[in-house]
Image (tube, rainbow, N blue to C red):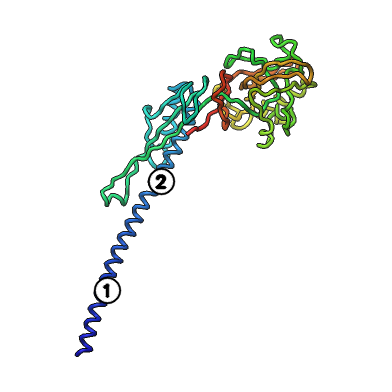
Amino acid sequence: MVTMQRRTRTSILARARWGVIGAWVAIAFVALAGAAAMAFDIGQLILAAQHCQNVADSAALAAGQSLPDETAATNAALALVEANNNEPGGWTINCSSSDIQFYGPGETINGTTLGPWSTAVRVDTHAPVAYTFARALGLEGTTVHRHATAMRGPVDGVPICTMWVSAETDYNFNQETQLLMADGPHCAGIPGAFGFLESPEGCTVAWDALLQGYGLTRAEIESAFVRTGDTVYAKTGVSVGHFVQAFERDQGRARLERAATGDWADDTIYDYEPDNPRIILVPMVTYLGDTGTNAAFRIEKFGAFWLERVNGGQKEITGRFIEYDLPGADPDSSLTSSSGLFAIKLVE
């Protein structure tokens, strides 16, 4: 009898313990399921925020390319946002003209004061995110917000094209210009063969290879970098054949030959790929004095020219002065004059 009672109490206690354990297991399962559900919704938020940031970055850069024209910049930003919303899947990104802010010379962006020729644009984007599992807790969703700011300003340094033009010459956009300065009456008396320059000190690339701009490595391009204020020197002994080979004919390697192929073939001065070989970035200089290879020039700024044609018989290189945004460069907001050569970068 005693044994039977003990077995009965033991069975009751065991069932009670299993009941408690089962309750805790059920609670733990609910908690884990809830945590997994929240993790899913949090993951969705993170992905939406990243997509929102990517679109903001791209829209700001697109708008920056149209500065200082605020209307064109606004249209460019909104068009890019809309293009991303047309992609299948993902989140709808909201952005209106009221989400786009502009900054001009003298204003401060992220600790940087814009110079007299610099501008900036900020684009705010918003993405509504609907919760999936958190609705069980009464949470329907939220909106993530991201922004990006792009600054556009004159460039203070580029890999050198080994020729020069006078900084004192008036350049009008889209106007044809004779680029062989030293051979023209407007720069009479300045020494040097046609107006070419030696490669900068420490450069690992031959001067004519820089002029042609074909097949250069990143390291070679970096070794040819020059900035405003640098002193550069004349290159003598240049023949017509040298610049014809660089610009017009060289077994498919010359600039005009390459520009007639592939994605560049249909480019025009109004609509072109940024890496078109017709685009040459030329130092705009002041003559400091001396003769021959000692003839010195100070780089005041840089000009972008669209190479039109080459006439070796007449010693002519004709180009059009263009307004050009240089990919991947840093704008110097302290420059005080517009050269037509600009860079765009994200500043926040």
Give 310 or 274, whichever is nearer the viewer: 274
Please report the residue visible at 44 percent of the width from the left and 35 percent of the height from the top: 56
Asked where in the image residue 198 lies, by quadrant, the reply is top right
Total number of numbered labels? 2
**Residue 266: % across, % down:** 58, 27
Examine the rendered structure and indicate whether residue 151 appears above or below residue 314: below
The label shown at residue 17 is 1
Q: Nearer the viewer, residue 10 or 135?
A: 10
User: In the image, what residue occupies the spot 56% across and 19% down?
Assistant: 336
At label 2, counting other C-alpha atoms closer than 10 Å, the crowd grade (few under 14, some 14-19, many 20 or more) is few
Percent coordinates x, y for residue 159 in the rendering: 65, 29
Which image quadrant: the N terminus? Answer: bottom left
For label 2, the residue is 46
Of badges 1 and 2, the one in the foreground is 1
Where residue 236 sits: x, y (%)? 78, 21
**Dot 2: element:** helix
Q: Residue at 73% across / 10% down in the picture?
A: 188
Which residue is the extreme one toward the bottom? Answer: 1
